[in-house]
Image (spheres, helix red, strand yellow):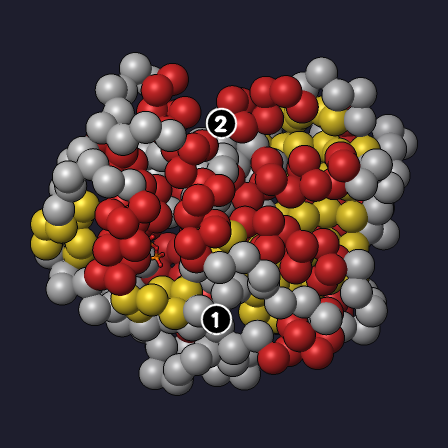
């Protein structure tokens, strides 16, 4: 198949491009490289089945020469383009984040309609906000602050879901919607400010681990290979099943437990240091994955310790590439 991955040079996107190439597909990777990085797809650039388009999903896609129906037939589109780390979307680029969610959804949906392609939207557990129902099932409508510092992402992704379902209802678009919970693994940006990358890199540098608040808030961490398997299963599932479907690992940890786990695995003499909890930081998060299990036959297999073991050497290499002297050997 010909498959377009928007956000393809980002963390999840670059892992997905590799998986799709391994399956023998032709992959078009589109990114504006705001949070994506060419290093993530470097060795793919010489693959005949792979091409890269530097573009922004906020601009019309269906009129681009490389994406016109006369140039090729797209079978599937994964829409992953969006900054996803809180420091990335809460900063100066908050407005661009909402635009990317909303205009990006419209542009990929128009492109999908032109090609008759199935389009999968990467939605997020953030649509549940600071949840009052635990664990979160797909029927829960969430508890989102509509104008707080996370709203550009949360409300942007909620609006994108709304656009996807209206394009399906009114225009016959072939859609799939997944809600991704916290994911980690190789090709994450060490500097993107998320908790797993921060803790691993801080421990490798021998710096104290920055726990926000008392570290009592919880998250459920999914290794990226498990997530990708779920995404591909959803894309290729019964066309009648549109979602939304939660994809994540239901093993729940407090942030303090995650920090202890990282310190055990990276013995560098680092300690915990407590910092202010950011505004609107969700107190808990854990996916109910019954729907994914029953509809997709999917569930994650990689436990946190194994996933961290598989991630630490990647972060160590990235730090060494930047000339950082590591306090622990990997
Ligand atoms: N966090 C932390 N220390 C860090 C980075 C994040 O304690 O250096 C906390 C953050 O406040 C949140 C959790 O870890 O409660 C997960 O944060 P992340 O940015 O990875 O993702 P989120 O689930 O908030 O989108």
> Residue 192, image x and y in percent?
34, 39
Residue sitting at 36 percent across and 34 percent down?
A: 190
Circle nearer the N terminus (2, 1): 2
Residue 268, image quadrant? top left
> Which residue is labeled 1 in the image?
250
> Residue 270, image x and y in percent?
15, 41
- Structural distance between the alpha carbons of marks 2 and 1: 29 Å
Q: Is mark 1 within 8 Å of ligand 1?
A: no
Is label 2 in a helix, a strand or a loop? loop
> Which residue is labeled 2 in the image?
37
In the rendered image, which quarter contains the N terminus?
top right
Residue 216, image quadrant? bottom left
Image quadrant of ligand 1 equals: bottom left
Q: Is mark 2 within 8 Å of ligand 1?
A: no
Q: Residues within 10 Å of mark 1 (few under 14, many from 20)?
A: many
Q: Kindly report which numbered mark, 2 or 1, lies closer to the viewer in this rendering.
A: 1
Q: Is residue 242 visible?
A: no
Position above or below: 188 against 176:
above
Residues 242 and 180: in front is 180
Is label 1 in a helix, a strand or a loop? loop
């Amino acid at each position: 198949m010909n498959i377009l991955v928007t956000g393809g040079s980002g963390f999840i996107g670059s892992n997905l491009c590799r998986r799709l190439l391994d399956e023998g597909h032709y992959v078009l990777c589109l990114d504006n490289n705001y949070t994506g990085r060419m290093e993530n797809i470097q060795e793919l650039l010489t693959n005949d089945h792979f091409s890269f388009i530097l573009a922004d999903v906020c601009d019309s896609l269906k009129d681009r020469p490389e994406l016109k129906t006369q140039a090729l037939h797209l079978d599937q589109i994964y829409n992953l383009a969006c900054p996803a780390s809180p420091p990335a979307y809460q900063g100066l680029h908050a407005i661009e984040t909402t635009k990317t969610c909303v205009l990006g959804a419209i542009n990929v949906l128009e492109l999908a309609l032109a090609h008759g392609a199935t389009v999968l939207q990467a939605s997020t557990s953030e649509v549940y906000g600071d949840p009052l129902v635990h664990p979160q099932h797909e029927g829960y409508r969430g508890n989102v602050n509509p104008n707080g510092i996370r709203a550009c992402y949360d409300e942007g992704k909620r609006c994108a879901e709304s656009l996807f379902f209206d394009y399906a209802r009114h225009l016959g678009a072939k859609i799939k919607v997944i809600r991704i919970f916290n994911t980690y693994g190789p090709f994450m940006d060490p500097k993107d400010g998320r908790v797993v990358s921060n803790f691993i890199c801080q421990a490798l540098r021998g710096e104290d681990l920055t726990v926000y608040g008392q570290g009592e808030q919880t998250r459920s961490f999914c290794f990226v290979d498990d997530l990708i398997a779920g995404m591909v299963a959803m894309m290729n599932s019964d066309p009648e099943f549109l979602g939304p479907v939660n994809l994540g690992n239901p093993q729940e940890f407090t942030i303090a437990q995650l920090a202890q786990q990282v310190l055990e695995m990276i013995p560098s003499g680092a300690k915990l240091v407590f910092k202010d909890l950011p505004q609107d930081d969700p107190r808990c998060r854990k996916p109910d994955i019954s729907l994914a299990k029953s509809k997709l036959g999917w569930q994650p297999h990689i436990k946190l310790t194994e996933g961290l073991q598989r991630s630490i050497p990647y972060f160590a290499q990235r730090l060494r590439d930047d000339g950082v002297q590591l306090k622990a050997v990997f």
